Image: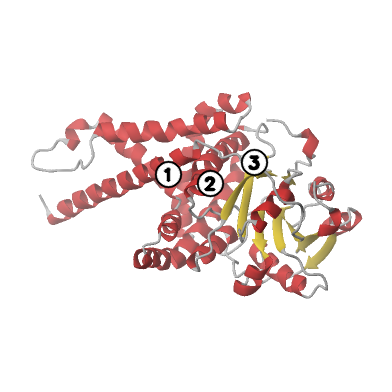
Amino acid sequence: MSILGTLADGAFIGLQGLTGALSAYQVGVSLFGLRQKQETITHAPQKTFAIFVAAHNEAEVIEPLLENLQTLDYPRDMYDIFVICDNCTDNTAEISRKAGALAFERFDDAKRGKGFAIEWMLERLWEQEREYDAVVMFDADNLAARNFLMEMNEKLINGARVIQGYLATKNPNDSWISVSMAISYYYTNRCWQLSRYNLGLANSLGGTGICIDTPLLKEMGWGATSLTEDVEFTARCVERGVYPTWAHNAIVYDEKPNTMKASWRQRLRWMQGHFDCASRYFWPLLGKSIKHRNWHMLDAALYLFQPMRLLIILVTSLVLYLQLVMPHWWAVTNVQRVMLPTNYWILVNLLLYAQLPLSMYLEKAGWRSYLALPLYPIFLLTWFPITVVAFFTKNNKTWSHTVHSRAIRLDELSN
């Protein structure tokens, strides 16, 4: 066998070992999300909040959110609503002011995107006469459960400094794309976020439904201006020993794209930003995790090692396919290409895929979501070309806006 062939076989065996280890790790961690601890509110409202709503030409969808935020189950004099009208060319600002929010208009062609908008708004917030205990962040297309601030108040009083709320889907039944995204979030909320919360690990911020302690923001600054500001701020927090936590009962409803084109653009931006953040934070976090024997940092580093969940599913599925349909290739004499037996990959795939309907059941998904499960593998496969394209375009810093159109009110939501 040639040296090149030997190296190729060694690399493939190494890939199996790495993927097998990550697969076992994620399956093991996800099991801790099967049980949800019963948490109750024990503290009266104490914390004050500045609610940020990031908006770029959101005139069609922002009014229901602002109406929703005005009627949260929290003393109205203990929070204010700030709408960041970022490079808007419509009447988002006018609608916001009529709805009782404080609208701040920003125009900057050089620094475009949500991360820059938040950083700009924080500078203005520090200039306000009133001081707030925490900053909460929503997107203009969101809706929030009425207990949202009560849950955040409880977490803050109990010592949390960065909190991620539960991310639900506002429009799961609009198309097979939106319901596929909803299925992904049932899994993520239960088997990724809740499991890490139960284990005491750092949770990942999801771009909206975030609450951050004001003193922490003033201490470390925002500094998250990449295409995935949530991934970047998570990494910055974990790197300094601040571990975001999870609020399973603080639900945020987020609108998902209805078409493959819109979904592709959104997910491509996510992957480009993820690669960018991984290139800057993976090695420092991994190094600190080894030096300090810190599981929080190791887990956060693994999350940055590309989307671990995506790689596990794609690579293990590929290995399973090859071992099943090409058994003779794997059994070439004097060449060891198989590190883990076929039964191992079958078990891993079964456990990974079984978590989808199990998560849906535990999260009380609507019956239509179960009907969409046969289409979900097709949606899952589209992540592969998106990830490949993102890898070669990871230096792109141009923000891609996702257009929102569903002006749904909280009492109109259904599974």
Instruction: Say whether residue 142 is visible.
Output: no
414 lies above or below 313: above
The residue that mark 1 highlights is 29
Residue at screen point 77% across, 52% down:
58
- Tell me, for residue 168, which label it has, or none: 3
Q: Residues within 10 Å of mark 1 (few under 14, many from 20)?
A: some
Q: CA distance from mark 1 to mark 2?
A: 10 Å
151 lies above or below 184: below
Q: CA distance from mark 1 to mark 3?
A: 22 Å
User: Do tag 2 and tag 3 residues touch (Cβ < 8 Å)?
Assistant: no
Front one among 323 and 286: 286
Q: Residues within 10 Å of mark 2 (few under 14, many from 20)?
A: many
Front one among 191 and 337: 191
- Give coordinates of residue 71: x percent, y percent: 84, 46
Element marked by disc 3: strand
- Give coordinates of residue 94: x percent, y percent: 88, 58
Nearer to us of marks 1 and 3 is: 1
Element marked by disc 1: helix
Which amino acid type corresponds to the residue marked 1 in the rendered image?
Answer: Val
- Tell me, for residue 193, which label it has, or none: 2
Which amino acid type corresponds to the residue marked 2 in the rendered image?
Answer: Gln
Nearer to us of marks 2 and 3 is: 2
Q: How is the image coloured?
A: secondary structure
- Give coordinates of residue 236: x percent, y percent: 53, 66
Which amino acid type corresponds to the residue marked 3 in the rendered image?
Answer: Ala
Label 1 vs 3, first from the N-terminus: 1
Q: Residues within 10 Å of mark 3 (few under 14, many from 20)?
A: many
Label 1 vs 2, first from the N-terminus: 1
Residue at screen point 69% across, 37% down:
171
- Give coordinates of residue 183: x percent, y percent: 56, 35
Label 2 vs 3, first from the N-terminus: 3
